[in-house]
C-alpha cells in the first residue's frame, strides 16, 4: 500500500480551465493492480471491474486516461453539450461544514462552507460548474482519443446534457441531437444527465423527477442512438416518485445512474451566497453527507427491479468514500458503483477497492 499523503487531483483553488488544461495534479506512484481473477459483463462489454468515476471530475480524455490507470475501469467523460458553454465563475467547489449525513428534509436548506476535514473520507463539498462544454468539434475528437487510451477491460462512458433556448432545436430535439453526436464520436455507452441542481432550477436540470417529460426525452434519444446502451442520471426523489419515473422511462433506457448531487443553499456566516454570480445560491452537494440519501435510492431501484422482474442496470453513485462503501452497494445489488468526490482526493481508492476482497 502506498504511503499516506494528501492529494488534490482536481485542485479546487485553480480555475476549471486550469484543471482542464493541466490536471489531474498527481505526482504519486501509479498503483500496482492485483491480477484480474474474473471479468464482468456490462451490456456487451467485458470489464475488469464494476468501478468507475461518474460524470464530472474527469474533464477530458487525459483525465479519463489517468483515472483508468489508477484502476477505475469505467471512467465517465464529463457531461458535454451540442454547443459551447462557459463555466460558472470560480470558485466551483467549496468544502462544507458538516460531519453528519443529510436527510431529505434538509434538501434546499441552508448550509455553511467549512474547512477540509482531517479525514478525507468525511469530505462533503458543493460543486457548481453549470455544465460547461467545449465546442462539439473539440469533444468529439477527444472522445475518439479517450477510447484509444482505455486499457484492456476498461470502458469510457460519455455523459451528455440537452440545452434549452437554442434557435436551431427545442430541448427535446437537442437531447436527441447531442446523444447522436456522442454516438458518432464513438461513445460506447451514453449517459444522459436529467438532474443538475446547478442550472438555476431550469428545465434541463429538473427533468429527472418529471415522468412524462423525461420519458418524452428518453424516447427521442432512443430514436436518435439506435441500440447504443443508454443510462439516465437521476437525483434523489421519494420512492413513489421514483417508481413513476422508472416506469415511464423503462421502455426507452437500459439503466439508471443515481444519484446526482443534493441541492443546498450554501451561505457564509455573514449570510451571503458562498458562490458568486446569479442563480448560484442553491448548488449541488456531494461526498460523505449524501451517502444515506444515495443508498436509499439504490435500494429503491433494486426493489423496483425485483418487483417487476426486470433487468435494468443500476449504477449507484453518491457518498461512497471508502472501498467498504463501494463494496456494500455492490453487495446490495447495484451493478456498477462510481465515486466522484472521494476519487478527487484519493488516487488510491480504486487500488483499495481491488484489494478489498
Ligand atoms: C466536480 C464535480 C463535477 C460534477 N459534474 C457533473 C456533470 O457534469 N454531470 C453529472 O451528471 N454529474 C456531475 N457531478 C455529480 C457526480 O456525478 C455525482 O452524481 C455526485 O457528485 C455524487 O457522487 P459523490 O458523492 O461520489 O461525489 C459532478 C460532481 C463533482 C464532484
Image: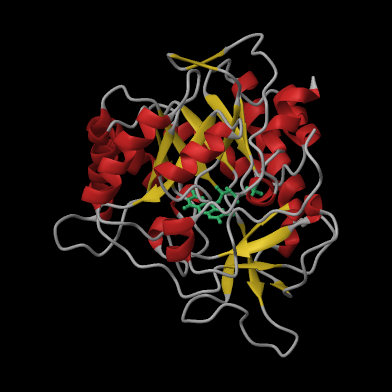
Q: Is residue 203 left or right of residue 65?
A: left
Task: Give how far across and how far down residue 28 sits, in percent.
Answer: 66, 45
Does any portion of residue 301 appear in the rendered image?
yes
Residue 36 lies in what quarter of the image?
Answer: top right
Task: Give the residue furthest to the top.
Answer: 37
Task: Give how far across and how far down residue 196 sits, in percent.
Answer: 49, 57
Task: Give how far across and how far down residue 183 sits, in percent.
Answer: 27, 33
Task: Give the residue furthest to the left.
Answer: 168
Image quarter of the N terminus: top right
Residue 179 lies in what quarter of the image?
Answer: top left
In this picture the colour scheme is secondary structure
Q: Residue at x 75, y 28 (%)?
A: 327
Q: Residue at x 70, y 31 (%)?
A: 351
Image quarter of the C terminus: top right
Residue 102 lies in what quarter of the image?
Answer: bottom right
261 is higher (above) or lower (below) than 74: below
In depth, the one of 31 and 94 nearer the eye is 31
In depth, the one of 308 and 257 nearer the eye is 257
Task: Give the residue furthest to the bottom.
Answer: 270
264 is higher (above) or lower (below) than 181: below
Does any portion of residue 245 appear in the rendered image?
no
310 is higher (above) or lower (below) than 198: above
In depth, the one of 121 and 291 nearer the eye is 121
Q: Residue at x 48, y 77 (%)?
A: 279
Q: Is residue 138 left or right of residue 281?
A: left
Amino acid at each position: 500500500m502506498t504511503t499516506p499523503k494528501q492529494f488534490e487531483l482536481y485542485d479546487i483553488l485553480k480555475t476549471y480551465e486550469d484543471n482542464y488544461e493541466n490536471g489531474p495534479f498527481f505526482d504519486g506512484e501509479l498503483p500496482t493492480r492485483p491480477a484480474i481473477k474474473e471479468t464482468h459483463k456490462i451490456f456487451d462489454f467485458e470489464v475488469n471491474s464494476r468501478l468507475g468515476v461518474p460524470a464530472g471530475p474527469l474533464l477530458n480524455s487525459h483525465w479519463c486516461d489517468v483515472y483508468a490507470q489508477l484502476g477505475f475501469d469505467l471512467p465517465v467523460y464529463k457531461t458535454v453539450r451540442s454547443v459551447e458553454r462557459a463555466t460558472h465563475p470560480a470558485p466551483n467547489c467549496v468544502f462544507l461544514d458538516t460531519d453528519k449525513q443529510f436527510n431529505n428534509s434538509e434538501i434546499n436548506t441552508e448550509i455553511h462552507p467549512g474547512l477540509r476535514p482531517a479525514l478525507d473520507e468525511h469530505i462533503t463539498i458543493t460543486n457548481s460548474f453549470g455544465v460547461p462544454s467545449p465546442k462539439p468539434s473539440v469533444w468529439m475528437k477527444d472522445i475518439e482519443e479517450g477510447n484509444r487510451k482505455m486499457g484492456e477491460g476498461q470502458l469510457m462512458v460519455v455523459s451528455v446534457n440537452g440545452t434549452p433556448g437554442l434557435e436551431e432545436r427545442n430541448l427535446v430535439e437537442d437531447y436527441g441531437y447531442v446523444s447522436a453526436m456522442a454516438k458518432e464520436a464513438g461513445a460506447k455507452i451514453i449517459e444522459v444527465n436529467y438532474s443538475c441542481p446547478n442550472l438555476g432550477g431550469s428545465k434541463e436540470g429538473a427533468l429527472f423527477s418529471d415522468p412524462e417529460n423525461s420519458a418524452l426525452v428518453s424516447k427521442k434519444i432512443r430514436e436518435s442512438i439506435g441500440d447504443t446502451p443508454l443510462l439516465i442520471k437521476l437525483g434523489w426523489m421519494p420512492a413513489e416518485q421514483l417508481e413513476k419515473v422508472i416506469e415511464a422511462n423503462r421502455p426507452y433506457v437500459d439503466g439508471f445512474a443515481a444519484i446526482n448531487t443534493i441541492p443546498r443553499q450554501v451561505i457564509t456566516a455573514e449570510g451571503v451566497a458562498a458562490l458568486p454570480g446569479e442563480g448560484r445560491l442553491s448548488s449541488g452537494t456531494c461526498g460523505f453527507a449524501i451517502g444515506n440519501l444515495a443508498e436509499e435510492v439504490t435500494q429503491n431501484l433494486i426493489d423496483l427491479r425485483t418487483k417487476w422482474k426486470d433487468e435494468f442496470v443500476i449504477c449507484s453513485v453518491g457518498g461512497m468514500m471508502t472501498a467498504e462503501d463501494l463494496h456494500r452497494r455492490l453487495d446490495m445489488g447495484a451493478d456498477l458503483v462510481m465515486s466522484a468526490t472521494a476519487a478527487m482526493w484519493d488516487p488510491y481508492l480504486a487500488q483499495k477497492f481491488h484489494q478489498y476482497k
